[in-house]
Image (spheres, rainbow, N blue to C red):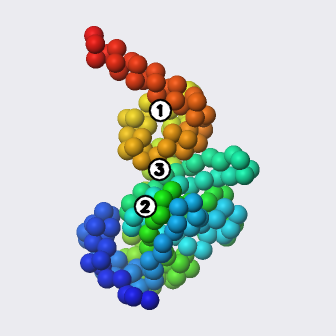
Amino acid sequence: MKKIEIHHIRPLVNYYTDKLDDAWEKLLTIVEIKRVAKGHAFIEQGDIAKVCGLVLSGSFKNVAYDDPSDERILRFTFQYGFLASCQSFNEQQPSSFAVVAMEDSEILSIDNKELVELCLAHPSVITLGLLFSQQIMIDHEHHSKVLSLSTPLQRYEFLIHEKPYLLNRVSMTDLAKHLYTSREALSRARLKIRSIERIQKTT
């Protein structure tokens, strides 16, 4: 396997911090580049998570399948984002969701057990792990906030203000699954907001 040098992933490194090159060098000794095709899972729901990863290119969604025809999207992850099912690995329990590629993607795949051993041997790597995990916690907090809102209109308005990039990167169908509403209800909310904006421009 070709060794990955830190200069190969400098944009990813700088996305998190430019002060932990030594920790990154150690982390790179246990990673491998992996390609995940659109629609394929990096982590499967129902399996104990053995890996985590960092997105070099592409995008992913955390999907919980209540049944084959009903899915809830818990989180979207784009370039440089962290992919993990932390609770699954920590508790050695099946993952409650799958991590699925939304397009052909490339990631740095990390074996969870090797990562734990590396953190024990080199505490500086723990700091990187905290930076990665912080991103997941922030996304979880945002999702909890949006679900606390009562109507599809309020939830869509929240995305416009808090995560506008999702509107250009994610389909209406997947946005509806993320907001726990129907595509039709979300479309009506979008039309209402556009109608209000047109009225405001003419007054």
- Could you tell which of marks 1 and 2 lies nearer the N-terminus? 2
Q: Which residue is mark 3?
A: 139
- Tell me which amino acid carries mark 1: Tyr
Q: Which residue is mark 1?
A: 156
Q: With respect to residue 92, does 148 lie above or below?
A: above
- Examine the rendering and report whether any part of residue 27 can be seen: yes
Element class at badge 3 = helix
Element class at badge 2 = loop
- Could you tell which of marks 3 and 1 lies nearer the N-terminus? 3
Expressed as whole percent of the image width and height from the top left, the position of residue 186 reads 53, 31
How many C-alpha atoms fall within 10 Å of the one at disc 2: few (<14), some, or many (≥20)?
many
Look at discs 2 and 3 and give the one toward the viewer. 2
Give whichever of 14, 124 is nearer the camera: 14
Circle on res. 58: 2
Expressed as whole percent of the image width and height from the top left, the position of residue 29 reads 41, 85
Give whichever of 116, 167 is nearer the camera: 167
Look at discs 1 and 2 and give the one toward the viewer. 2
Expressed as whole percent of the image width and height from the top left, the position of residue 159 reads 43, 37
How many C-alpha atoms fall within 10 Å of the one at disc 3: few (<14), some, or many (≥20)?
some
- Asked whether, in this view, residue 200 is left or right of residue 181, the answer is left
- Tell me which amino acid carries mark 3: Asp
